[in-house]
Amino acid sequence: MTFNSCSREKEVAELVARGQWPQASTPELRVHATACRSCGELILVTSAFQLARAEVASAAKLSSPGALWWRAQLRRRNAAVERVGKPILGAQIFALGIYLFAAVAIFVSQARHGLNWLSWQVQLPQLSSFHLEALWPSALFNPGWGLVVLIPALATLALLGGVVVYLASEKQ
Amino acid sequence: MAAAPERKPQRMTWESILPNALAGDAPRAAELPMDSDAFAGFYERSARPLWAYLARVSGDPALADDLMQESYVRYLAAARPDSIQTEGEVAGRRYLFRIATNLLRDHWRRPRQASIEEIPEEFFAATASSAQSDSQAVLGPALKQMRPRDRQLLWLAYAEGYTHREIAEVTGLASASIRLLLFRARRKVANLLREQNPKGGQL
């Protein structure tokens, strides 16, 4: 395909774009346009697209600009909050990493020394002075009263825990 | 003319971030660069041409609705280029078309998963009703035979009247290649239009 554009194309394009073709054109330009393939194509294509643009644009059903404005506002706000929260999240991940590293390091160093710090667990059952049941309330050993105390206590704890988590997340 | 005072670049530190965040800097950063009244005016002037572009290039009015809404939301929510401050609404409009063009490209790149049963009935109704208009009858079949990129270039050049430089800015193509691509696309669509209307040649 050869790529030859006409020198008068600009002149024709301006008139067609302004909707003044052929009224405002000179007779000489009109004669040229009928003979010139490039100018003829330009007039044909521009007229078709201008007509289509006018018809399609008038058929558009537009939504409310206010709704779009609020959607954009919400998206920008969320992005800003996320941007602010990013360094805090990074610090939390860093702290967790340090904590895990320290825990592993301590465990490894103790393991190298033969896990001496766990030896007390082996001796625990043999100790005559170690009576765990002495720490528990006697009501727990009574099957009737024990459950009456334990279940409401656990339920209260669960309820309070839920309230604390809810309040904490609400504050964030 | 007095020289503007030189601004020192601000270093980002924990002390500078956290108090600002706690003092509500996030909501201030979330403020849009355009108030709702100014946006309503801009929307009124630019929405119809944008919808026409999206509907004609995609050939799908329902998709044009979705992409137009998303284009405006992104236009408002994104950090906007400096040219909008200097050139005003003309540059803003160009930027809007650029967002819409990118969204269209993303849509075409996405793998198609929808089956024919999932497409709403209104889509076919809308396509059928718009097919009755004169321009659709003339230009529609010709555009269907063009590649999506050619449809974009032709619409931007001959419906919107953009220059080659502006089309390059909107589409992301090299400015030098626009001329040749447009020339080829125009020749092809002109031949198709002549084939449909052999008597007239002109509309």
Image (tube, rainbow, N blue to C red):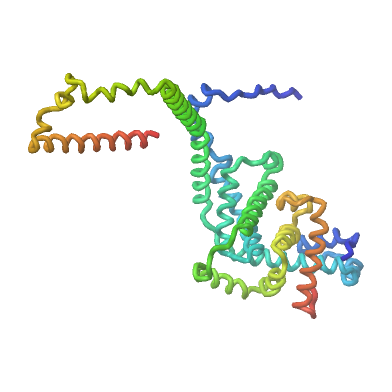
Q: Is residue A108 above or below residue A5?
A: above
Q: Residue at x 18, y 25 (%)?
A: A132
Q: Nearer the viewer, residue B16 or B40?
A: B16
Q: Position of residue B127 (x, y in %)?
A: 58, 71
Q: Residue at x 63, y 57 (%)?
A: B109
Q: Residue furthest bottom?
A: B199
Where residue A28 sits, quadrant-wise, is: bottom right
Q: Is residue A164 above or below residue B159?
A: above
Q: Position of residue B71 (x, y in %)?
A: 59, 52
Q: Residue at x 51, y 43 (%)?
A: A73
Q: From where the camera sits, is residue B159 visible?
A: no
Query: Left of B75 or right of it: where is A42?
Result: right
- The quarter of the rendered structure image containing the C terminus of chain B is bottom right
Query: Left of A102 or right of it: where is B9?
Result: right
- The quarter of the rendered structure image containing the N terminus of chain B is top right
Where residue A25 sits, quadrant-wise, is: bottom right
Query: Left of B64 or right of it: where is A84?
Result: left
Q: Nearer the viewer, residue B188 or A101?
A: A101
Q: Position of residue B59 (x, y in %)?
A: 63, 66
Q: Position of residue B122 (x, y in %)?
A: 51, 69
Q: Nearer the viewer, residue A95 or A117?
A: A117
Query: Left of A151 or right of it: where is A144?
Result: left
Q: From where the camera sits, is residue B76 visible?
A: yes
Q: Residue at x 78, y 50 (%)?
A: B174
**How many numbered marks have been drawn onto this rendered protein structure?**
0
Q: Nearer the viewer, residue A89 or A67?
A: A89
Where residue A113 sits, quadrant-wise, is: top left
